Image: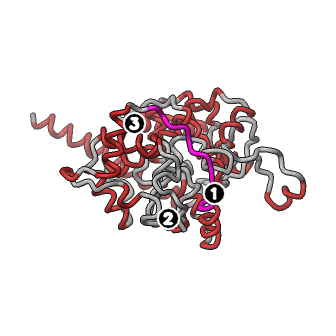
Amino acid sequence: MIRLARSWHKLALAIGGTLGIAVVLVLAVVYSGVYNVAASRGHPAWLDWFLALGMRRSVSSQSSGVLSPPLDSPDLVRLGGAHFHFGCANCHGAPGQAENPIYDHMLPSPPRLELEADSWTSAQLFWIVRHGIQYAGMPFWSGDGRDDEIWAVVAFLRVLPELDAASYLSLVSGNVEGAPFPAEKLTLLGARQVPVTACARCHDTESRPPTSAFVPRLGGQSRHYLAEALRQYRDGNRDSGFMEPVAAELTDVEIAALARFYAELDSPPSMPAAPSAVTLRRGRELAEKGDPEAGIPPCESCHAAGVLPAYPRLAGQSQAYIEAQLDLWRVAGRSKTESGRLMGTIGARLSAPQVEQGAAHYARLQPFDAGGERLP
């Protein structure tokens, strides 16, 4: 027994000594600078294999508990496509879009997702978009708590391999005019076929409603609300992986101009759904009377026309958009501002049926119903 214990002790010493020598050698190589970290050198084949295997296994393991919602909604796909063109296509390319040599020379090189997306499950894509990948230049999602936005991107990635250049451009353009720029505009505005920061990629114009039911109608909102929302996105006080990167580039002068433009815009509303009469009646009661027993005030006390310019008008917004926003309030999302915390308290008291009923009621109204004068 004593002999066996001595044998194990010698083996442990040998293993420990070997590991110690290995650590010293690694530190010596690192400190000496003999290893060439230049991206132009590339990785040895064995290291490429090792890193790819580790990344695949890590994503597979970490995403195992993610449950994917239904992703076949065209509105979800259009919303995800607009962001992909703005936030992803520069690095990953897109159908009909040549690879930018700057990003192609990254190490590792970003994969062409129209070729690679099918090799991942929806849960795995969600995990990658949400958390990013270390040592690959892949950032994690900037909108904290906005899983709804991430699933929109995943919905688009699910259809991306099926798109050719024309269908891709049509899907991501939204309401933007897609005609090629003449030379004089190219010299001033660049060669992008679809301006990545153009509001009309997602939002309403004079002749068209928002491109997705999950996007708000901005026409007719008050200048105060629009400007404050953009400032909150820009300053990190309102979370959105879609809006924060766009608003970050806006000056106060540009924000004021955009707020004035949309406050004066008379754009068409989205086509409402056809809920039951009971749903509409209960939604109207919630809007006009609230639910005193649950501590829910009337929606109209803040959101009616001409009441409080700091709060958004709900009439004419799509049911899907209102439901999505109320669901965020119910789980304590958007709580970084005073009004956000107030609405979060109210949202937490709403039941799932009340969310549907209130959203259905406002979606059936015309944008300027209920005394709908424009707000300053």
Splitting the image into 4 quarters, where does residue 302 fall? bottom left
Q: How many marks?
A: 3
Q: Earlier in the sequence, mark 2 or mark 1?
A: 2
Amino acid, disc 1? Leu
Residue pointed to by mark 1: 265
In screen coordinates, is 74 left or right of 294?
right
The residue segment tinted magenta is 262-274
Where in the figure is residue 3, as x and y percent of width and height?
A: 14, 36
Q: Nearer the viewer, residue 192 or 176?
A: 176
Where in the figure is residue 308, as x and y percent of width and height?
A: 43, 66
Q: CA distance from mark 2 to mark 1?
A: 14 Å
Where in the figure is residue 111, as x and y percent of width and height?
A: 62, 38
Residue pointed to by mark 3: 63
Which of the two discs, 1 and 3, sits closer to the camera? 1
Which of the two discs, 2 and 1, sits closer to the camera? 1
What crowding class fits label 2: few (fewer than 14 Cα within 10 Å), some (14-19), or many (20 or more)? many
Residue 247: assigned label: none
Q: Secondary structure at mark 3?
A: loop
Q: Is residue 208 magenta?
A: no
In screen coordinates, is 194 left or right of 369?
right
Residue pointed to by mark 2: 225
Q: Which residue is at the far bottom?
A: 253
Residue 24 position (above or below residue 327):
below
